[in-house]
Image: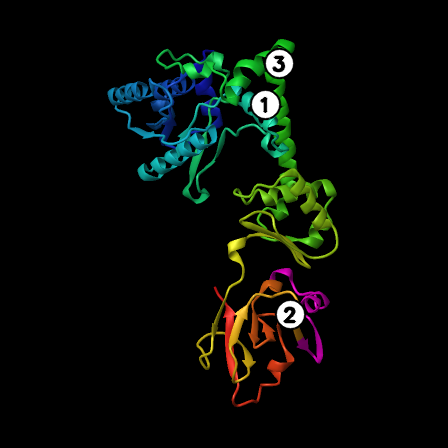
Amino acid sequence: MTPYEKFIKIADEAHYFDQHQEVLVALSGGLDSMTLFNWLYAARDLLNISLSVAHINHQQRAVSDYEAKALQDKMADLEIPFYIANYVGPFSEEKARDFRYDFFERIMKKYHLTALVTAHHKDDLTENFLIRQIRGSRLRHLTGMEAVQTFGEERQGLSLIRPLLDFEKSEFDATDYFEDASNAENDYLRNRVRNLYLPAFEKENPRFSENLAGLSDEIQKAMAIVAYSARAYAAAEKIDLIEFSREIENLQYFILQDYIAKFPALEVSKAQFDELLHIIRREGQYFHAISNDYNFIKDRYHFYIEERSKATEFETALTPYPTGNFQQIDLPATGQIVIRKRQSGDRIQVNGIDKKLRRYFIDNKVALKKRGNPLIVVGDVVYGVLDVVIADLSKSLKHDKMKRTLYYREKR
């Protein structure tokens, strides 16, 4: 069986294109992607697909423009729609990858293409595993690539298909490809892994890459078991402390890890992660900024992460009987009304007892998040904490005809 025949057999048995007629091929012009394109082009009628091609000119080499023009001319000759974008700015593998996939997604949405096809293959799986190990990735990131996965926003119905994952690079047969001379340089980690580290490991054990792929597959299966065991928490915005405490400690570890992964912009070090796990397991409430953008909160019943910009805001009015569902706090007829944050030493009198606000919050088990709610102060006297407590002095003004009433509600 030729590599092309193997490709057709795999694509047919896996039903890669049964739901996708309009296909976008990510084409770099190298051996991998040109082989993929050639095989798809040859099989387009058999697979009942229509091809479009997207290319990113990273502008990192003197020949980049020439190669982009050559690909454009080739696609014009074949009457294949061709879309190109130029990468601008400081280059890094991560930034370039994000740029590529953002461009691919825009093209797919604009021209109603439902599947992106890339030329990732078995050798890429091995390289990715080693790279992630070197960078210190967690177990969940040491799994292999999926042959088919959702691409972009889930509701858009787009898919990313990798039909070459069962192929080694030695099986690729394209002759019309460009050789990237920078692949022989070792400036980037991926090149060092490909050119130096993997050959050294394979010298020790010729089956090293095969064994690594098998290990990655086993990790993927193990993580699937973890995901199934923790499925009750998958969509939770807040994690129930009682339910969490009933799980075995090893599963708690992965539940927290998966929960943090819901916040892609949040980077948590191993030390931070271990500290959060310790905080969750011990008694007491907790409120702390774990980054410039996120707070970690543990109240009496849940733990959760929220954006710091989402702190509770209130709207207030002195207008009598404002429209809407407002709460109210009565204030004396004179004196400047100040709405401010809590300060050290603030006191409040409730039920005839005068105590520090800090002690009041602790004694009454006020949720940590609410302890930051604004105070209503006239003179030096605290008349209340919005949505938490109203002082005796405010209550005593209930029947005072000269009083002022401040109306408030949480801003939606």
Badge 1 is on which residue? 130
- Amino acid type of the residue that numbered disc 1 sits on in the rendered structure: Leu
Q: Determine crowd level at label 1: few under 14, some 14-19, many 20+ residues with C-alpha closer than 10 A.
A: many
Q: CA distance from mark 1 to mark 3?
A: 11 Å
The answer to whether residue 351 is magenta is yes
From what the image shows, is residue 304 above or below residue 193? below
* Image coordinates for residue 255, horizontal then vertical, percent: 65, 44
Say which element carries label 2.
loop
What label does residue 265 carry, if any? none
The magenta segment: 349-369
Badge 3 is on which residue? 201
Where on the picture, by quarter, is residue 183? top left
Q: Answer left or right for 341 relative to 40.
A: right
Residue in front for this viewpoint, 298 or 27: 298
Residue 166 visible at all: no
Q: CA distance from mark 2 to mark 1?
A: 56 Å
* Image coordinates for residue 108, horizontal then vertical, percent: 36, 36
The answer to whether residue 127 is magenta is no
Q: Determine crowd level at label 3: few under 14, some 14-19, many 20+ residues with C-alpha closer than 10 A.
A: few
Mark 2 or 3: in front is: 2
Badge 2 is on which residue? 346
Q: CA distance from mark 2 to mark 3?
A: 66 Å
Mark 2 or 1: in front is: 2
Asked if marks 2 and 3 touch (Cβ < 8 Å), the reply is no
Residue 372 visible at all: yes
- Amino acid type of the residue that numbered disc 3 sits on in the rendered structure: Phe
Point 38% across, 33% down: residue: 104
Point 70% across, 68% down: residue: 364
Chain-order first, disc 1 or disc 3: 1
Where on the picture, by quarter, is residue 62? top left
Point 63% across, 18% down: residue: 211
